[in-house]
Image: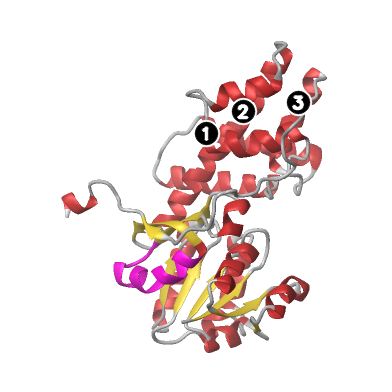
Amino acid sequence: MKIGFIGLGNVGGKLAGSLLRNGFDLTVRDLDKEAAQPFLDKGAHWAESPKAMAEAVDMVITCLPSPAICAAVMEAEDGILAGLSEGKIWAEMSTTDESEVRRIAERVKAVGAEPVDCPVSGGCHRAATGNIAILAGCSRETFERALPVLKAMGRRILHTGDLGSASVLKVVTNYLATANLVTLCEALVTSKAAGMDLNTAYEAIRISSGNSFVHETESQVILNGSRDINFTMDLVVKDISLFQEVAERANVPLEVSPLLKSIFQDGEQRYGSRELSPNIIRRLEEATGLDVLAPGFPPEMTDDEPEEAGYEVKVRGREAAS
């Protein structure tokens, strides 16, 4: 299967790298051709336009910063839609809006191609090793066709149901990660203020009921001082806003979500939209005059687990219900 990949940023570049590493015939494109050069050096092809890419491959993957950018790449005169045809697949791997992915998917189906929304979760360090999780919303038939490609990019692959379901669940998971990050910042600053050794505090949280994936990753780069998790405050605001919109469409009166959004909007105003998201702790460091740092933690996360073949995660109770 020939694969096209548009968007070679922090996550997209690592996903595309997994495809190339696993032997797929890969065509790439990015606004910054320099970002594509390492892939071209390793045998990938360059597409002169999204349309040309869609015409040349069996499956086009987009991994872009926002729904608006994705729409532009899809719907421009020389965009992906202009090159899609019967039997091809469009896979949207960005964190995007459910209603927008459904809208574009209707146009994809109108030309005979099949859409999949398949965002990832687990951090850039796991994307680099092919061990990231992938959520996939689409028909079961399309999922089966796309599965070999998804398994080359990720370890745990979950078919979430109809198109759009993966996008909803992705913003749900990002919302939870954000809530966890904010509470961890409060916990670490409070531990420091109470005179606790922060290395010990980290371990206490790690071995207790307070542990989480976010603690084992973002707390480490917070304590190192780099705060580098390859994610920025504007992207947090985007994701929380998408989650809030899902809740509002379903008439769910949220209380924590608006507070999280206001915290990160304040962080954007103070430190800039492209500030690394774990640096939201600076708001509390500045308020208390404390530096939340500890020796022995890495400046960035690396995945120390060996790459494993991807597999489909089975949904508990689904087979019994069917």
Residue 127 rendering spot, x and y as whole percentages: 58, 57
Give the residue number, with chain letter if any, for mark 3: 292
Q: Residue 67's quadrant in the figure?
A: bottom right
Q: Which residues are magenta?
A: 137-152
Q: Which residue is rendered at x = 60% and y = 88% of the image? A: 52
Disc 2 vs disc 1: which is toward the camera?
1
Secondary structure category for the residue under label 1: loop
Q: Residue furthest top?
A: 194
Decide which of tag 3 and tag 1 comes sooner along the chain: 1
In this image, 19 relative to 309: left or right?
right
Residue 223 rendering spot, x and y as whole percentages: 73, 31
Query: Badge 2: few (under 14), some or many (20 or more) residues near its Cα, within 10 Å?
Result: many
Give the residue number, with chain letter if any, for mark 2: 184
Residue 258 visible in the snapshot = no
Secondary structure category for the residue under label 2: helix
Q: Is residue 147 above or below residue 123?
A: below
In this image, 225 relative to 263: left or right?
right
Q: Which residue is rendered at x = 57% and y = 24% of the image? A: 205
Query: Could you tell me how far apart the alpha carbons at marks 2 and 3 are, in whole angstroms?
Result: 12 Å
Q: Amino acid at mark 3?
A: Val
Give the residue number, with chain letter if any, for mark 1: 212
> How many numbered circles are shown?
3
In this image, 288 relative to 166: left or right?
right
- Residues at marks 2 and 1 touching, judged by CB atoms closer than 8 Å: yes
Residue 209 rendering spot, x and y as whole percentages: 47, 24
The one nearer the camera, 111 or 18, is 18
